[in-house]
Image: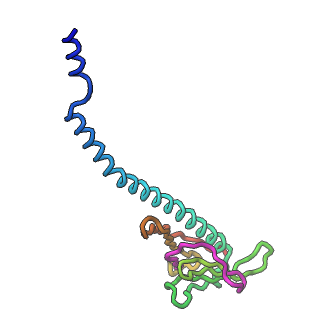
Amino acid sequence: MRRDMDKMSSKAGYTLMELMIVVAIMGIVIISAPKMFTGAYRFISLATARAEIQKNSRGALANMNRDLRQAQASTIVVDCLAGQPPHSRITFTKYTATGATQSVSYYQKGKQLFMSQSGAAGKLAFDNLRYIAFAYPQTDDTNILSISVTFEKATYEGGTKALQLAVEKVRIMN
């Protein structure tokens, strides 16, 4: 009976070596956990910024594309506001649903894209704009216009995520 008790007491509990290994593993996990959480947060911030930028840029290009398709090719003027990047404003006359004409202007002002109709004060169309450029890709065809847009969004620790949407070519129908 005494031998059975000695065997049970020698097998019960943990050795010092096992405890040291567990403490070392827990230390590694505790030290690396903040880095993993920070990495996951950065990844989520970048993915969210990318999705938001894509949504804004697609919306901006769809609106401009729709309006430019209705423009009169002979009325298109590409220039810029004072202090803004070159080729960052486009002004044109387009046909409305009633057959009348209306003056439309898209332009960059700081980090915002504005749209103005019939000489009225511009209203904010999209925010977080880094750069927009209007150009004629073919000098012999004034019915094709290209638009290049770059949007940016703040992410983690003062960083930004920028996305340049591929140049979209618009065929002016009128």
Question: Residue 118: within the magenta?
Answer: yes
Q: Residue furthest front?
A: 2
Query: Vertically, is 55 above or below 138?
Result: above
Left or right: 123, with 79 as reference point: right
Quadrant in the rendering for residue 143: bottom right
- Direction from residue 24 to residue 82 in the image, left or right: right
Q: Which residues are magenta?
A: 116-135
| Residue 18 position (above or below residue 97) | above
Q: Position of residue 78 (x, y in %)?
A: 57, 84
- On-image quarter of the C terminus: bottom right
> Residue at coordinates 51% horizontally, 72% vertically from top-left?
149
- The rendered magenta stretch, by its main secondary structure, is classed as strand
In the displayed structure, would residue 43 be above or below residue 152?
above
Residue 1 horizontal/vertical position (percent)? 22, 8
> Vertically, is 128 above or below 119?
above
- Does residue 170 show up magenta in the picture? no
* Rendering coords of residue 87 (x, y %): 52, 83
Q: Quadrant of residue 8?
A: top left
